[in-house]
Image (cartoon, coloured by chain):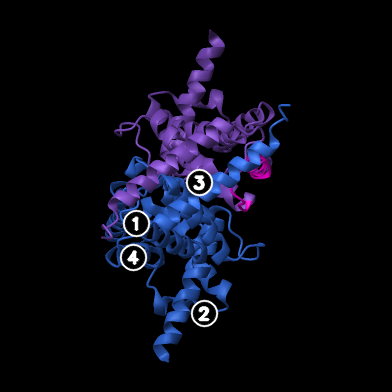
Chain colours: A purple, B blue
């Protein structure tokens, strides 16, 4: 119980600190103001974080290192379907950003001020996330489920799709976090997928091919009906 | 000639200022340092910009207001093809970010410190860009060229795709700006496009339908050849 309470307190402090750093800049907000924003004493805040650097380091842990763990788990659990692997990566990364949008922006804005160790951990974590996204895209291209794309530029772009909500998301907006993440995951998957009908199935399904032919015939009939009569 | 020289000087100052603001924060970099970075006298810098606020305002002009003008022009010039309209929006916005990646990050980071008028101009310009992206997506959905998507979440996501290079692009990387913008524009278009073969063409093209049928037949032959012999 005590541990849960402490975790909740820390989370509250980080959240308030992130909001203040966004408003006033990292240099502009003091430990005193963070405490005041929460109706806590300054001593209570110092109990959890020795100084603002420790708060920054904890924010990196909350956002970038968690993103790394999530993407690495999805990658190690990935089955043989690159489409679902990619969908999971995008969906969970977007959900993380949506639930930590202020924290994410603070980490981005204060990268240059991060204590050396936190800075390095942050850089490494970002590289790991990029490499997990790249691996999923490369796997999909390799088996012909995805178009032939530059995997690295594409991976960066998808991380951008996941991260951008940090710059516009409002928790009281008309769409739920889950709906937004679903939409973004689908956009990401569709952006690389090859049209289903051009995909070569490893196990050819004749009845499916016949169904496609039938669909084309329907399409053709429709077109012929539309042609101006020739006589 | 003199005007061109002055414009080039201003551009250089903005560029150096943006790099310093990224490194040291807006509060941490002085006019003196900006001058030193360029090997100019402080007086020369003051000739172009009265203070750092004026530099910030000029950076907003360079990035957000220019993005607004570009997207509005593409929208007013858009022909009836929402796919090409969207492609143009994404491509030119990405190119703008690639050529102004530091400037863009400074504007993002210092939004709260912008002088009131620049702040409002920046917000209005962002809204206009969003509304131009949204209009292109809605147009494509309406004529059935794009999937049915939430136009606003999709527009935000595409602006994210265009903007993310600001966070990773290095001008000396292996890909040219043009190649990156091409890749991102294609990802954006593909993310919403309906598979071509499901689109109902307003003017039915029989020869195209026959070509599709032929492709399906080839596909079917391939499958049949792959089936285990039955006797």
Kindly report the distance in space between the C-alpha atoms of the residues bearing marks 2 and 1: 50 Å
Whether label 2 touches label 3, CB < 8 Å: no
Residue indicated by mark 3: A191
Q: Residue at x 30, y 54 (%)?
A: B202
Residue indicated by mark 1: B82
Q: Secondary structure at mark 1?
A: helix
Residue indicated by mark 4: B74
Residue occupying the far bottom of the picture: B1
Residue indicated by mark 2: B41
Above or below A4: residue B81: below
Residue occupying the far top of the picture: A1
Q: Residues within 10 Å of mark 3 (few under 14, many from 20)?
A: many
Whether label 4 touches label 3, CB < 8 Å: no
A143 in magenta: yes
From the viewer's perspective, is the residue at label 2 or at label 4 nearer?
A: 4
From the viewer's perspective, is the residue at label 1 or at label 4 nearer?
A: 1
Residue B149 vs residue A73: left or right?
A: left
Q: Which is nearer the N-term, disc 2 or disc 1?
A: 2
In the image, which residues are magenta? A133-150
Kindly report the distance in space between the C-alpha atoms of the residues bearing marks 1 and 3: 17 Å
- Chain name for mark 4: B
User: Is residue A217 in view from this perspective?
Assistant: yes
- Chain name for mark 3: A
Q: Secondary structure at mark 3?
A: helix
């Amino acid at each position: 119980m005590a541990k849960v309470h402490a975790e909740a307190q820390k989370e509250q402090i980080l959240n308030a600190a992130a909001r203040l750093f966004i408003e006033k800049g990292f240099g502009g907000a003091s430990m005193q103001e963070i405490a005041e924003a929460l109706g806590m004493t300054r001593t209570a805040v110092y109990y959890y974080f020795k100084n603002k650097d420790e708060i920054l380091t904890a924010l990196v842990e909350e956002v970038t290192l968690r993103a790394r763990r999530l993407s690495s788990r999805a990658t190690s659990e990935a089955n043989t379907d690159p489409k679902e692997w990619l969908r999971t990566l995008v969906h969970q990364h977007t959900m993380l950003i949506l639930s930590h949008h202020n924290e994410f922006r603070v980490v981005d804005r204060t990268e240059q001020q991060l204590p050396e160790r936190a800075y390095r951990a942050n850089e490494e974590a970002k590289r790991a996330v990029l490499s997990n996204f790249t691996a999923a895209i490369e796997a999909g291209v390799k088996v012909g489920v995805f178009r032939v794309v530059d995997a690295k530029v594409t991976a960066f772009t998808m991380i951008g799709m996941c991260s951008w909500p940090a710059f516009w998301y409002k928790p009281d907006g008309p769409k739920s976090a889950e709906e937004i993440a679903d939409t973004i995951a689908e956009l990401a998957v569709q952006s690389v997928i090859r049209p289903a009908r051009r995909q070569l199935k490893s196990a050819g399904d004749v009845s499916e091919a016949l169904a496609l032919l039938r669909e084309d015939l329907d399409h053709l009939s429709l077109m012929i009906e539309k042609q101006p009569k020739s006589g």
